[in-house]
Amino acid sequence: MTVREIPEAKIYFDVGANDGRTSLPMAGNPDWVVYAFEPTPELADHLRSRARACNNYHVIQKAVSNKAGTAKFKIAGQGDWGTSSLLDFNDNIDTTWHGRTDFKVTNEIDVEIITLKDFCIENNITRIDHLHTDVQGMDYEVLLGLEELIDRVQGGDIECSRNHDVKLYKNERFVFNDVALGLYENGFVIDAINPNDDHGNLCSPESRLSDANELSIWYRRR
């Protein structure tokens, strides 16, 4: 697949695009070119349908990690389908995510996995103005897959578990301390850290970082 950039437009990578709530608002905006990576067939079809009239919005129906290949993708087809992952759910989620009903695998499919380094080289992308990463337990692997091309990233936001005790997925390697240090070592500064939940439940304005299982880190190149 080769896609053509719009001259002078900024580049937005939406990795784990889900239903497009993050990137679809930019569909049709000539200031941006969006690459939405989403391996779930139903969600990828939804994105294509919503953005079919926009030549700046490209759907890539593949998973992204630090190594190319193929793997089983576990689809959790409940709620907003937002907890589907290459990883299995952890054994302690009934305790750490009490009351959640969407942590159930409803289907498994074979997916192709690519790296952002290969994608950038193939499509001659020399700058990523914003990298949104929400791939359920393997977000930092997406950055690692850029290798030396991580210098092309100007900023973004990334999700991670607060620590290993509350992580949602088995074999989830990188939690907040790892991700924050990795961002610093790769020349980024952190602008904000926000809770994604409150003891596994929905956030409120009073939610605290120390009570969240997952965090969102907003960063930019220093």
Image (tube, grey):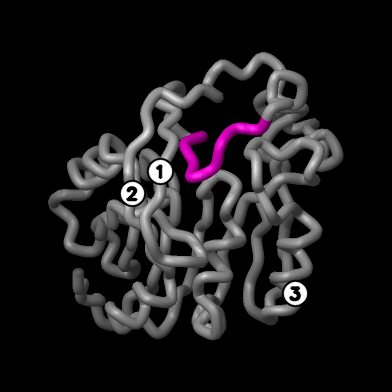
For label 3, the SS is helix
Between 151 and 94, the residue placed more toward the observer is 94
Q: Quadrant of residue 26?
A: bottom left
Q: CA distance from mark 2 to mark 3?
A: 32 Å
Q: CA distance from mark 1 to mark 3?
A: 32 Å
How many numbered markers are drawn?
A: 3
Magenta segment range?
83-90
Residue 12 in percent (x, y) is at 41, 65
Residue 172 in percent (x, y) is at 66, 48
Residue at image position (35%, 73%) is: 119
Q: Is residue 115 above or below residue 175?
A: below
- Using residue 195 as the reference point, say whether residue 119 is left or right of it: left
For discs 2 and 3, the disc positioned in front in the rendered view: 2
Q: Residues within 10 Å of mark 3 (few under 14, many from 20)?
A: some
| The disc label shown at residue 111, or none | 2
User: Who comes first in sequence, dot 1 or dot 3?
Assistant: 1
Residue at image position (27%, 35%) is: 42
**Residue labelled with disc 1:** 72
**Residue labelled with disc 3:** 184
Q: CA distance from mark 1 to mark 2?
A: 6 Å
Amino acid type at circle 1 is Lys
For discs 1 and 3, the disc positioned in front in the rendered view: 1
- Using residue 222 as the reference point, say whether residue 5 is left or right of it: left
Amino acid type at circle 3 is Tyr
Q: Residue furthest left?
A: 53
Amino acid type at circle 2 is Val
Between 104 and 50, the residue placed more toward the observer is 104
Residue 1 lies in the magenta-colored region? no
Q: Quadrant of residue 192?
A: bottom right
The answer, for residue 30, to whether it is visible in the render is yes
For label 1, the SS is strand
